Structures are given as C-alpha cells and as structure tokens.
Image (cartoon, rainbow, N blue to C red):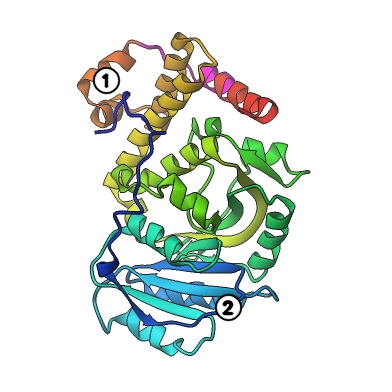
Amino acid sequence: MINSQTDFFSHIDSISSLSKETIEMVFDHVIEDAKYTIAITVYKRAAFLKQCLESAIHQNTDIPYEIIVVDDDPTRNNEVHALMSVYSNVPNLSYYKKTKNEGLMDNMNRSIILARTDWVLLIHDDDWLCKDYLKKIDNYHRKYPDYTILVPSHTTFYFDKFIETKSSFREWMCKMKGCWRIRPLDFINGTCATPTGVLYHKDSFIQSGGYAKQYGMAADYVFFAKHSSENKILRINEKVFHYRFAENESLKQDTIDNTKVIGHYLSVYLMNRYRWLPQSMRDRYERTRLWISCKGDETEIQRLLGDEVYEKYRKVSSSNFIYRIINLYVKVSVFFKGV
C-alpha cells in the first residue's frame, strides 16, 4: 500500500523476474554495427502501430540502428501479427511476441533488455518519431556522454487532434541552452518525463531495477525521480517525437486516481527527503497541491486519501498564493543550486 511511509527510492528489481518462457521471436534481423535500438511496445493497436513503425523505419540518418517490436498480446494471427508480416523483410527489424500478457511496465522492461545495443530508444505503439529523431538525439548524446537517459520534448495529440501545450518553468529558463539536468525535486509537482520517446542507457536501466509495476501506471513517475537521484538525466527542449493520448490505460479513472495518490505521496517523500522548508510550510504546500489537483473538491481528496489522512490535511489551511510561492522557490532553487 502506498502511503507516507513508502520509500520511493528503495531498490526494486523488476528485471530479473522476467521469464524467458513468456516470449518468442517471430522474425529477426541483425545489424552488426548498430549504435541504437528503437524498441516499440505494442498491445493490439495495429492502426497506430503502422504510423509508429513507419516513422522508425524511415529515419533520416546514416547511423546504423535496429528496430524491435515487442507484442504483449499472446493472440496469434491478429491484426498486429498480420501487419508485422508485411514488414518481415525489413533488414533491420525484429518482431517478438508474448505467450502471456505481462502488462505495460514489464513490456517496457522487456523491450529495453531485448535490445542488442548499449542505447535504446523506447516508444509506444501510438506515438511516432520525427524523421530526424536519431540524428538529433545522437548530437546530444555525443555532447553529453555521461548522461544515462535523454528525455526530449514532443508535440501532443489527442487521437489525431493537435493539442497546444505550454512550456514549463524550466523549459522557459533553459530556452537558450536547450537542455538541462533533471533533478529529483523537479518531480514535487508532477513528472517532467514520460517513458516513451526516451533514450536509455541499457546497463544503467537494468542496474536501476527498471519500471516497478507495484506503482501501476505511475511507475514511470517514480522511476525517473529515483533515477535522477542516482544518475544524470538530460531534459531536451527540442521536440523530436509526437505523443498521443488515445484509448489506453492512462485515461481510465483507476489510473488517474493512482497517479494522483502516488504523485501526492512522492511529493511528500521528496519534500521531506530534501528538507528545504519547515514542516508546517511543507504541509501547507501539499494541502494546496491536493486542493488544486482535485479542483477544490474536498470530497474527492477524502476519497483518494481516506478518512484518517484527510483529517490531518483538513486541519491545514490551503493557500494558492503560498503554493505558488513555494513552487517557484523550489524550481528556482533546483535550477540554480542543482539539488
């Protein structure tokens, strides 16, 4: 159970438990001198997969790379299976299919460890890459070789409708430089990284333990916060892939609830771990953060956290002004102090 006692930075090994018996290779093509692997996680969405796959195949680069598709649906001869058969002769493409559904987090873990290269670009089947993704990410990789994860920016779509998004405070501060190092306290008010469209150093990812499915669909939130405390993560302003909200787990109410609860307790954990503020100020910040997250609905806060925890927060006055001041203070401090 996730609560105020949860140690989000404890090591959880989600890699070694993956069974070799639950996956089989459908077809395989090897590029001996490949520098990168594009690993595509897929589950049933053949219509979206084609666009993702085409964007991976037609990269505008001379860099040798491989593509692997890891299908989490054990059903044979379905739409994804049929689509992949059309691409079976692509010289740098391999296709793996599960014999048992493992879920998204384990499928992401599986996709990264299946790569034969040291660096793996993970992308979900409903997202797609810009043509210059590999060329541009390679430039950052060579410029910042000691970073173990590179997180580029993206455009956002709801199905096929473009969504205008605002730049974050850190993005605004770093426009001239174009990138910055992600720090743990960047996560006190939400995540600043998504697992898709991201370049991972394979060995560092395995050593970190991978995505822990105990945290549900918020596992990426926890993973990046923890990884940023142990390794260097580079956030890149440049938009080099397209992120799509579609009919998936992230839009389900249970997933939304879980993300809010974990977001709350992870924020509390980080604020307490780094102890920049008096406890009373941290409580007021978290109280207002919850209030904003739940759009001022006290009943919703009580439903998410339970009666006992809510009773504690009910006694703390909320202040949107205090929240904004503390949030600005933390972000400026993270930027200049590098904690």
Q: Position of residue 245 (x, y in %)?
A: 44, 58
Image mark for residue 5? none
Q: Amino acid at mark 2?
A: Glu
Residue 178 point in image, percent of width and height: 73, 47
Q: Secondary structure at mark 1?
A: helix
Does the stretch in magenta take in 318?
Answer: yes
Please give the range of residues in magenta.
316-325
Q: Is residue 4 found left or right of 184 in the rendered image?
A: left
Residue pointed to by mark 1: 309
Q: Residues within 10 Å of mark 2 (few under 14, many from 20)?
A: few
| x 53%, y 78%: residue | 54
In the picture shown, does residue 334 fall above or below 32? Answer: above
Quarter-wise, where is residue 325 in the image? Answer: top right
Visible residue check, residue 42:
yes
Q: Is residue 276 magenta?
A: no
Q: Position of residue 199 (x, y in %)?
A: 56, 57
Q: Is 133 rendered above or below residue 303?
A: below
Callout 1: few (<14), some (14-19), or many (20+) C-alpha neighbours within 10 Å?
some
**Circle on res. 32:** 2
